Image (cartoon, grey):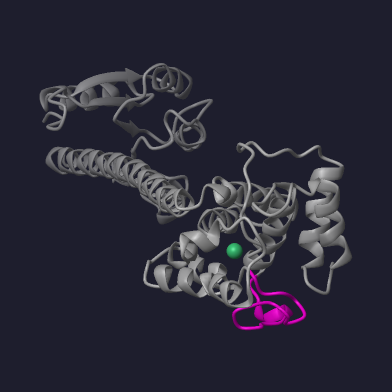
Amino acid sequence: MTDTSTEKPASILVVDDTPASLKLLTDIMKVEGYEVRSAINGELALHAAFSHAPDLVLLDIRMPEMDGFEVCRRLREAPETRNVPVIFVSAASETEEKVRGFELGAVDYVTKPYQRNELIARVRTHLELHELRHHLTEIVDRQTAELKESEKKLKSNLVESVGLLAAMVEMRDPYTAGHQHRVAEIAVAIARDMQLPEEQIEGIQLAGVLHDVGKIRVPAEILSKPARLSQTEFSLVKEHPQHGYDLLKNVDYPWPIAQIVLQHHERLDGSGYPQGLKADQILLEAKIIAVADVVESMMTHRPYRPALGIDAALKEIQEHRGTLFEPTAVDACVRLFREQGFTLQGTAGSESLNA
Ligand SMILES: [Fe+2]
């Protein structure tokens, strides 16, 4: 009998301290076409198994110095022989011995004197089972790797298309160029400092890059107006979180992206827009993006004013810590700039609106 999957004969290690028994077992297996190695004691058996792991071991139990149980235990301990099927072949027929053998990880137990055909059938079955298990593990490993790879691709496609969407919005208004990416960068750094789970941080990054996507429905001339906005103009701008939500609500992201975008201008005391939500009603992700948004906006210049700088930006969020802005996010943001020397990787730009 050969190992059909590789067309190479399966290799069997036969272990028995009685020369006649060892020869008989070896001959039977050789006639069946297996590649057979034999060992006359436990020590030699282990040496043979460790130097080249067999596909199966036929193992006598009662041997001087190191018995079959000990050999089996050591085979199970070593990574290279851990999964090699062991069949005990022993004259001992007490249930207790058999149970001990199985407890040590043997796959079968054949009592001497054995029926030649029965022994051959058992060996064949266990070799096939072992082969199947090996294949199954290989298939599962390969499929897991493939799944991880396609998940990675999907994610990077998602990030790419989101980046494209963000770029489209910013193209209409040169003053907002890079704003969303910089907000995402600050928001991610804040979230990291707050030690949020990586999964949640990924959502914050995506929502950060998209947070002003609704501005695509705000007239371009309002977005880039180099002067303070009128009441009416500002009310149009204030619709952008809702527009963003409408655009994103049907996209099946693994994070509540549409909700975060909808809430990024909400403030803890309920003075924000569009819904006037309060503290606990606002998603933490939206609170973090709110802080990042304000800081980024004040750091960069706008059509109607020069950049106010990081000091003014940090002062602003600290002054409104707990009233407008989430205290933990404010603290993390201040730590980033004041203690950790955080700087933006993105190119300098500006946002046209205080929105
Ligand atoms: Fe906004």
Q: Quadrant of the C terminus?
A: bottom right
Q: Which residue is located at x 47 percent, y 66 percent? A: 218
Main SS, magenta residues: loop
Q: Is residue 348 left or right of residue 323?
A: left
Look at the picture and state if 35 lies above or below 343. above
Q: From the viewer's side, name the closer residue of 46 and 8.
A: 8
* Residue 90 seen in the figure: no
The picture places residue 106, in percent across and down from the top left corner, at: 38, 44
Q: Which residue is located at x 56 percent, y 45 percent? A: 178
Start-end of magenta stretch: 265-283
Q: Which residue is located at x 16 percent, y 22 percent? A: 8
The picture places residue 105, in percent across and down from the top left corner, at: 43, 45
Q: How many marks?
A: 0
The picture places residue 85, in percent across and down from the top left corner, at: 33, 38
Q: Quadrant of the N terminus?
A: top left
What is the quadrant of residue 238 in the picture? bottom right
| Residue 281 is covered by the magenta coloring | yes
